[in-house]
Image: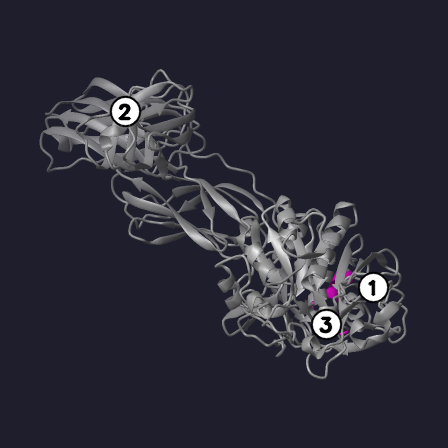
Amino acid sequence: MITASLGAAPAHAAAPPSSTAAAGAMNGPVDPPLYDETADGGTVRVNVVTESRTDLVDAAEAGDTLQSFDTLPVITLKVGRSGLDELAAQPGVVSVTEDVPVPPSLDQSVPLIGGTKAAAAGMTGTGSAIAVLDTGVATGHPFLQDRVIAEACFSPADDEYSATSLCPDGTAAEEGPGTADSETGACATIDACSHGTHVAGIAAGNGTGIAGAPARGVAPGADIVAIQIFSKFTSEDFCGPGAAPCVLSFTSAQIAALEKVLQLRRSGTPVVAANLSLGSGRYTAACETDPRKLAIDDLFTSGVATVVASGNNGYGDAVSAPACISSAIAVGSTTDDDQLSSFGNRGTLLDVLAPGTGIVSSVPGDGYASKNGTSMAAPHVAGAFAILREAFPTKSVQELESLLESTGKTITYTGAGTPRIDIGAALDGTQPAPEPEPTAKPRPSVIVNNTDYAVPDPGTAQSPITVANIPGNAPKNLQVHVEATHEWRGELKISLADPNGKLYPLKTTSPTENGGTIDTTYTVDASASPANGTWTLQAQDTSSGATGTLKDWSLTFPTPFTKTGSFAIPDPGTVTSEITVSGFSGNAPSALQVYVDVTHEWRGDVKIDLVGPDGTSYPVKSTSGTENGGDIKATYSVDASTSPANGTWKLQVRDASDGATGTLNGWSLAFPSYENQTRYSVPDPGGLSSPVTVSGLTGAAPKKLRVYVDATHEWRGDLEIHLVDPNGKLYPVKPDSSTESGGTIQQIYTVDAGASPANGIWKLRVEDISQGATGTLNSWTLAF
């Protein structure tokens, strides 16, 4: 019985891989301990990863080829010190690591994780296959009921390592029926070869009608792909004192098996998960240079989850390899009462937990036995993927993983908390919510792009802004704000290109401008150009010898809704002036800007109201006993959100008392809306802030401030969004969610920002709270 052995360090001249060793390897492609192993003239097995498959030809010249692969830029060599030096000097070599041999690492556990609830719902994993990459499988065991549909064996032999093949015909690789049967060939006489049969039974065993058998594995309807990846070792240098003979797996055998799973998947075998209950080393950070990552990445994108045991060293802040690979599903172990198993590795790299203590499952000889280890936890998760694939056939691996993580029971411990999977909860009403229908983006008045562009020396930098929802042509007074830095500003020529390519000059070159910052607003008569389309700012360095950066720029579309003229105000009485608004969707803003220009001999007599298209009256200015004669030239902020934006608006100016006369000289309506079109990648996990600067408004922000967000993410539920006011106050916009699947967010959210000033720098704060899915903030709009 294998207990707590997964991840035990192989006894060899080299230390097992670790996060420290990996960090040292960053100084060159060759892992430093390899030089120590070959210092006395000996040789070592290494896995060489290259940038492309064309680089493999040169890499192979450095040593003897032991294993090649069909699709991956990887080759396994036996090399000496000179071969290591040759590989280190080749520009196409990414990494050189030892081909380390590593060890293999249900009645109560299946109900605990919701397996019986899944069975009651008719979900058994039917239609999927689980690949068990292990010590082979007793293919004739009644618990597995002839559901092994494909077999292969990758079992290298190497005299220097005391390794011999466990493939039935004694070769290093064999495929076809019987090649992974642990009850035939050399494996039949080795107790450790029971490991793979035990793992397969946990994932997909079916005890129906079998006396003395556990009731079921996790996915009793799933098929099994059995792949033998272990070799027999007879030296205590590798097995440990008193432990020879033993079975260990070379990394190269694991890569070959993973590539075989990918081949099966691409040829139509419905593999949903590949289980690796093995590993070694101690990693506190993701091991992205591990040679197995390429194959695991390919499986992930092809719809196969690679489920890996975290290791049995009892590390509180680390896992073994290959569980440390970011695209793998790292699984830790719990007891049946949801306590962490003392032997299990854990920490922030752990993805999920599952039972791994005292697990009863199948063993060769048609028997059953209890085993412990994260080896036993991992196949619970592999089986869970088969159940969820049956329930959610169109969901991605990422979505299924997120379902398991978001619905599991969190087990907290020092430094972290990890969900113990609950398949029943994942099936219960937690199907990811569909992508919402997009809502219309508010019509912008100011659009900014604050992406930094280096200006070529000499050459031209171009930065785009796309305008939509503004009818007709651009205005005669289009405002273009530009911020740039340059070591010699006089070399810069700046132009604005309209959507049709027509150029409007903004800044010419000058022999007198020295180095510094350009922070200028230009006004352009762009009335000959369409408003909608992509506008481009062109910053041209006309002479070599000085460099610079286009920092940001913006377009401001002044309000087109203006009425001018001289309208006498009756004394007493009311004058009414109308403006027709079009081109908006929905209601008017809650901070509609109303500019009024009135002259009166006694301003205190003047009362002003705004009437919406629906007849709703909004007070703008009241009478006063203290205002004497003069001009009223003021902007008022009006909450007009109960009225439609489009239609005829009326300004009513009333003289409430006789004895003084006046005129309405003009008025206008502005719908302030600020858009940032800078595209940001959202850190995974992590956060970003995108700013807009608001100016020219009066008073406080509205109680119905609208925030339009355009973002794309592989799992929208990971995103938590806040609006940050100019004083740093946070307003929640969008919470994280366990049910939002991948897709696009194009939504308007309403925020009560009445406690914040309107003017200043506002920021949208977007945070990805969980690792494993990526996305972008495409743009956002703040509509007052």
**Circle 2 residue:** 506
Question: Where does residue 128 sit, x and y in percent of width and height?
Answer: 78, 53
Q: Is residue 323 visible?
A: yes
Q: CA distance from mark 2 to mark 3?
A: 72 Å
**Circle 1 residue:** 167
The amino acid type found where label 1 is placed reads: Cys
Q: Nearer the viewer, residue 381 or 455?
A: 455
Q: Nearer the viewer, residue 443 or 765?
A: 765
Q: Secondary structure at mark 1?
A: loop
Q: Secondary structure at mark 2?
A: strand
Q: Which mark is residue 109?
A: 3
Q: Secondary structure at mark 3?
A: helix
- The image quadrant where one finds the C terminus is top left
Q: Does residue 637 appear left or right of residue 566 in this picture?
A: right
Q: Which mark is residue 75?
A: none
Question: Where does residue 443 sit, x and y in percent of width and height?
Answer: 41, 31
Residue extent of the magenta highlight: 107-120
